[in-house]
């Protein structure tokens, strides 16, 4: 199975502080890769590099074998879905307009958009009655469902999720976790999922990438991390969240 | 004060106002057309300075030309000597009443008293003609309350030396003139330190209530008689002669020059005081000017324009000034605000420039624009000044509105793959719409107030009654401009609140 995204020696610093040391990483097609680590470890930086919100200081990022450049980034973005913790929905647009925004721009037909919209409502368990509502009229969980619909609208090859459930209360979070997992399975979606919660990482991840201080410390299954820690930090991180993991 | 323009023009203005009434919304934005149309006629333009006598002489000249079958209009109260002179040289006006002493002192900047011949020759080189004196000498005088003068025993200007505690209030022009306060004080060695600048008409009130003790006046000023004031004798013969004449462009049509010439030697001081008194009593310069003609030709009485007509004309003009300048401010301000929101040298430069413009007093900004080519004494100048004033709130609110968009939303728009133009037009600007609209509203409300100053350079509007009321010291006339201006500001506020509901996306108002 080939890698959809390949980072080679990618690094990024802000002023003098390195946010990401030279890093290599492949994201395999059809897999859910979870980036995990304490805050400030560089996991969001990595995501933002892939979607082109920031430019790497060195190294190259290839998407589907093609290096990401300023010239092709806008086209590549149509093949990548991106969901952030706050949802990132535009407050002046209805849920429907938020979801259809990009599709309208690349001139999809009304009929096709409507069909896809209803399909996504069904997929994300979002009532289509709520489509005319503005983001402020929705609950946090509903907002994230709309945000996910927007990210999936153009059937992207890659879905980037930056702590998408971080701001939700535990019950809503649990039900969305379950729905998300089902959705990913149904779509055989390639996902790069950022979280700081080990339980969530284990719940979703085929592949867990543990990061600390701008470096990837270990990559593997949860069993690998637990039984063959590459570094004392790995055990420390896992033990710190053990209570959660065991229950 | 009833006829800034002839009846033809005023009825045109009213007709325009009527047409506009149903759609004031449109009016605000369709104004440029009307401005251009009204500027296209080509009559002889008479200017006048901002005091009663000059208004009356201007009206007399207009009427004389009109009676001779020459289309003419009168721009009253345009400002002081330099503004009128610049306007004459620049061709914005064709003629205006002036005084020989002022020509020597202010225009040719000499302290020597020039003969009529010398003045005529010097003007001729500048392609400006001068009539023979009209017949009266309106020199400066210092006036006091007679009771006070008697109590102190002051009869001549020299006598003032003995009373350094007297408070002196002078018009701004007199304070700065070469034949004004400074040389006068030197010649007479006057000791008074308490000297303030005050508007001419307000000065009479100040004199009456004792806020000041001495003020400057014109010797034909009807107020001297009306207020029973005493003029101090110029015992050292400081003030030069101020013979009233008309200055005109040498290129003015010959029949118009001939018509103006017929006024030579026809107005003595007594007659002029009468006309001035009539003007101040009736607040109607046309009527006062007509008094001049009644002597010879009998009754050709012009009916004054009714108040509702005047109000419609002022208000419409005011809306023209504010609407057109606001339109320009919006068209220029939003793009500038977008650039400014990106920061950097250019962004800070734009905000800095708009901020500096705002700190220039509006009167000074008008005065700075008047001498520039293309501007001069016209509505154009007023609109340009209002445009510059309106810029800052719009630029700043556009910039802050855009900068206040949270980073996650900004990045979401980028991550979706929207083009920069779509991001701006479909995401950023709608999200900043509340802030931008409130900037436009601020601009509009401020400009309704500032536009009253446009009357100072003859651009009309609701400042017209305010200015002539100030000039006549007549509160009712001032209120005729001040109240409609305040109502207009309220109306505009309300109009924009309504606009908010139409233009700000619903999702941002929930």
Image (cartoon, rainbow, N blue to C red):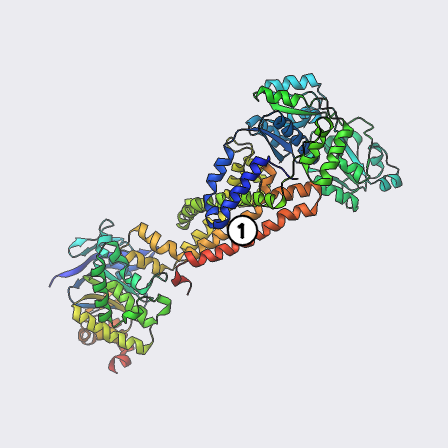
Which of the 4 image quarters holds residue B117? top right
Q: Is residue A147 above or below residue B449?
A: below
- Near mark 1 (Cα within 10 A), the count class, few <14, some 14-19 or many ≥20, is many
Q: Would residue B206 be found to the left or right of residue B251 on screen? A: right
The reply, left or right, for residue B40 in relation to residue B266 is left
Q: Position of residue A64 (x, y in %)?
A: 16, 57
Residue in front for this viewpoint, B503 or B309: B309
Quadrant position of residue B65: top right
Identify which residue is drawn at 35% across, 52% down. B425
Q: Is residue B191 visible?
A: no
Q: Going by the image, does B159 lie left or right of B218? A: right
Residue B418 in picture, x, y percent from top left: 28, 54
Residue B222 at what x, y percent from top left?
76, 36
- Nearer to me, B441 or B488: B488
Q: Whole-percent x and y of residue A246?
A: 24, 82
Q: Is residue B448 above or below residue B68?
A: below
Q: Is residue A103 visible in this depiction of the protein?
A: yes
Q: Secondary structure at mark 1?
A: helix
What is the quadrant of the C terminus of chain B in the image? bottom left
Extreme residue toward the left, this view? A1
Q: Residue at x 40, y 46 (%)?
A: B335
On the image, numbered disc 1 is attached to which residue? B445
Residue at image location 49% in from the left, 54% down from the top? B495
């Amino acid at each position: 199975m080939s890698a959809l995204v390949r980072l080679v020696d990618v690094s990024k610093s802000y002023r003098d502080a390195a946010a990401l040391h030279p890093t290599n990483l492949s994201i395999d097609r059809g897999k859910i890769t979870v980036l995990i680590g304490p805050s400030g470890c560089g996991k969001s930086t990595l995501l933002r590099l892939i979607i082109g919100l920031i430019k790497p200081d060195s190294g190259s990022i290839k998407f589907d074998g093609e290096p990401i450049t300023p010239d092709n980034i806008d086209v590549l973005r149509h093949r990548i879905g991106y969901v952030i913790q706050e949802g990132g929905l535009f407050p002046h647009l209805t849920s429907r307009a938020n979801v259809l925004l990009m599709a309208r721009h690349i001139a999809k037909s009304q009929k096709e958009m409507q069909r896809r919209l209803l399909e996504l409502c069904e997929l994300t368990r979002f009532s289509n009655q709520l489509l005319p509502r503005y983001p402020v009229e929705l609950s946090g969980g509903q907002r994230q469902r709309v945000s996910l619909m927007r990210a999936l609208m153009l059937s992207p090859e890659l879905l980037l999720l930056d702590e998408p459930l971080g701001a939700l209360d535990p019950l809503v979070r649990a039900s969305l976790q379950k729905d998300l997992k089902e959705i990913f399975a149904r779509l055989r979606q390639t996902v790069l999922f950022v979280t700081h919660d080990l339980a969530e990482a284990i719940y979703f991840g085929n592949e867990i990438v543990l990061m600390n201080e701008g470096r990837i410390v270990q990559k593997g299954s949860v069993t690998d991390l637990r039984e063959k820690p590459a570094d004392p930090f790995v055990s420390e991180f896992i033990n710190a969240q053990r209570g959660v993991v065991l229950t | 004060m009833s006829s800034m323009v002839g009846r033809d023009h005023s009825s045109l203005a009213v007709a325009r106002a009527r047409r506009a009434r149903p759609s004031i919304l449109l009016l605000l934005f369709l104004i440029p057309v009307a401005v251009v149309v009204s500027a296209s006629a080509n009559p002889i333009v008479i200017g006048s300075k901002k005091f009663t006598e000059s208004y009356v002489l201007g009206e007399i000249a207009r009427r004389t030309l009109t009676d001779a079958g020459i289309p003419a209009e009168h721009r009253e109260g345009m400002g002081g000597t330099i503004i009128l002179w610049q306007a004459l040289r620049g061709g914005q006006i064709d003629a205006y009443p002036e005084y020989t002493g002022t020509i020597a002192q202010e225009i040719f900047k000499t302290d020597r008293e020039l003969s009529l011949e010398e003045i005529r020759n010097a003007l001729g080189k500048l392609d400006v003609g001068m009539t023979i004196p009209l017949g009266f000498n309106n020199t400066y005088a210092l006036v006091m309350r007679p009771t006070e003068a008697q109590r102190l025993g002051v009869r001549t200007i020299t006598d003032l030396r003995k009373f350094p505690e007297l408070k002196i209030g002078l018009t701004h022009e007199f304070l700065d003139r070469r034949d004004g306060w400074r040389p006068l004080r030197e010649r007479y060695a006057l000791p008074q330190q308490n000297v303030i600048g005050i508007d001419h008409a307000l000065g009479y009130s100040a004199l009456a209530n004792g806020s000041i003790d001495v003020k400057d006046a014109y010797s034909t000023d009807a107020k001297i008689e009306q207020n029973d004031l005493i003029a101090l004798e110029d015992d050292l013969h400081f003030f030069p002669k101020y013979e009233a004449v008309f200055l005109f462009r040498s290129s003015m049509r010959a029949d118009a020059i001939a018509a103006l010439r017929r006024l030579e030697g026809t107005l003595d001081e007594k007659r002029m005081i009468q006309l001035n008194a009539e003007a101040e009593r009736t607040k109607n310069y046309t009527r006062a000017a007509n008094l001049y003609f009644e002597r010879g030709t009998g009754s050709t009485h012009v009916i004054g324009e009714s108040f509702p007509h005047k109000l419609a004309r002022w208000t419409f003009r005011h809306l023209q000034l504010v609407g057109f300048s606001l339109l320009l401010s919006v068209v220029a301000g939003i793009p500038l605000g977008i650039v400014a929101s990106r920061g950097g040298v250019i962004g800070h430069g734009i905000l800095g420039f708009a901020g500096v413009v705002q700190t220039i007093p509006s009167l000074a900004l008008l005065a700075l624009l008047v001498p520039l080519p293309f501007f001069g004494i016209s509505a154009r100048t007023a609109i340009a000044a209002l445009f510059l004033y309106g810029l800052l709130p719009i630029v700043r609110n556009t910039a802050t509105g855009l900068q206040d968009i949270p980073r996650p939303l900004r990045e979401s728009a980028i991550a979706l793959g929207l083009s920069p133009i779509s991001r701006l037009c479909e995401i950023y600007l709608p999200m900043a719409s509340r802030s931008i609209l409130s900037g436009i509203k601020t601009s509009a409300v401020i400009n309704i107030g500032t536009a009253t100053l446009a009357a100072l350079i003859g651009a009309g509007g609701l400042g017209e009654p305010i200015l002539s009321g100030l000039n006549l010291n007549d509160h009712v006339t001032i209120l005729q401009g001040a109240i409609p201006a305040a109502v207009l500001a309220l109306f505009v506020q309300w109009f924009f609140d309504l606009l908010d509901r139409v233009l700000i996306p619903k999702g941002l108002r929930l």
